[in-house]
Amino acid sequence: MRPLNLMWLLTTVLTLPALADTDHPTLTVVTWGGAYERSQHEAYFESFTEKTGIEVETVRFNGGLDALKEAYAKGNHSWDVIDMIKANADTACEQGLLRELDPSILAPAPDGTPASEDFIKGAIGRCAVTQLVFSTVIAYDDRAFPGVKPRRVEDFFDTQRFPGRRALRRAPVGLFEWALMSQGVPRSQLYDLLSTERGLDLAFNQLDKLRGQLTWWTGGNEPARLLAEGKVAMASGYNGRFFDAQVNDGAPITIIWDGQLLDYNSWAIPAQADQPQLAERFIRYATRAEPMAHQASLISYSPSRHSARERVGLHKETSTPMRPYLPTLPAHLEKAIHRDQQWYTQTFDLRWRLFERWMNRHATPD
């Protein structure tokens, strides 16, 4: 019998854990937390792990580009996939912060329809693929208005008929459109007017009327909590977060669908990601019709694939029909503002500069 090579044995034992980690890597997904992230865990992350053995870890952020820019500057290679607003993904792509995405990684529909035909128009971009449609809406605390209820965008700005504090996201998103719409500007003319100095002045002048009555939020879970706790009477927020508070928590919240700002969330891969093939594998899985429809049974965001929308039925826990709560319901679309992605991309720096200047000029305590 040949003598046992103890050095070889020691080396082999010490390297086994590293080999195991290589065989079962971890995927890091940057996403938004709260009810939205919980729906992702059940619809995507847990089932992806079950099928592949690959664990999914999440990093939470509140959108925008600052976190991605900071990670890029620090050479952070641990972020594999990031869930971004489409306009931000387009801007990040132009700035070289995202990898280009190969459309061939996307799976066909269950009936064989190519992905390019199954996704909604414009969903497949150079660096990102849109997975769902959501909207930023206005909602109110039912208890704050026992008589006449607010029902239009202009009611948000009418603190005489509908008194109480308002909550808005601390970002130049949706604010300008609502400010102009509340002054009678048709939805079809909003972005033309906002492309002029006069239009932006009109928007800021309207926002000035709410000075002293505003609470600013940054995290997506905050608006529903502020309403449920009676700290504000009306708030902007994401339609799915309000739905979750209504259906799962019984919060006395009502959504105003007038002027809902339609928007899109997209999967993208950071430019510095060191596991791009693993990221592509996840995106292929998460953009299949079945898991997308599964998410829509948990939270009221609409899938970006036609084959997934056809599968949307009842809420998993309460059996509530989901379609009436989707932003893409025809009755809701009639009153929607379709976010101009090109305008948002082209005005990114300008919007933030003007917004921060206005905030500093009219700083008020929450």
Image (cartoon, rainbow, N blue to C red):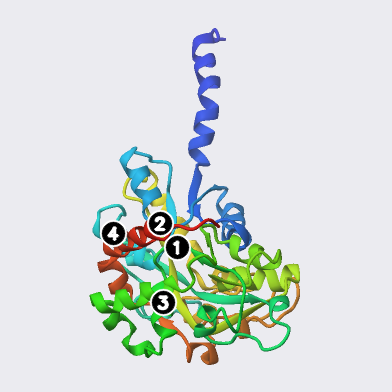
Q: Position of residue 208 (x, y in %)?
A: 42, 71
Instruction: Kindly identify which residue carries mark 3.
Output: 206
Instruction: Kindly identify which residue carries mark 2.
Output: 280
Marks 2 and 3 sit apart, C-alpha to C-alpha, by 45 Å
Kindly identify the residue that appears in the image at 32 percent across and 68 percent down: 125
**Mark identifier at residue 284:** 1
Residue 325 appears in the figure: yes
Q: Amino acid under label 4?
A: Cys
Earlier residue among tags 2 and 4? 4
Q: Position of residue 196 (x, y in %)?
A: 23, 77
Front tag of 3 and 4: 3
**Mark identifier at residue 93:** 4
> Would you call the spot at circle 3 few (<14 residues within 10 Å), some (14-19), or many (20 or more)?
some
> Would you call the spot at circle 4 few (<14 residues within 10 Å), some (14-19), or many (20 or more)?
many
Q: Amino acid under label 3?
A: Gln
Quick one: SS at disc 4? Answer: helix
Kindly identify the residue that appears in the image at 51 percent across and 77 percent down: 110
**Mark identifier at residue 100:** none
The answer to the question of whether label 2 and label 1 lie on touching residues, with beta carbons closer than 8 A, is yes
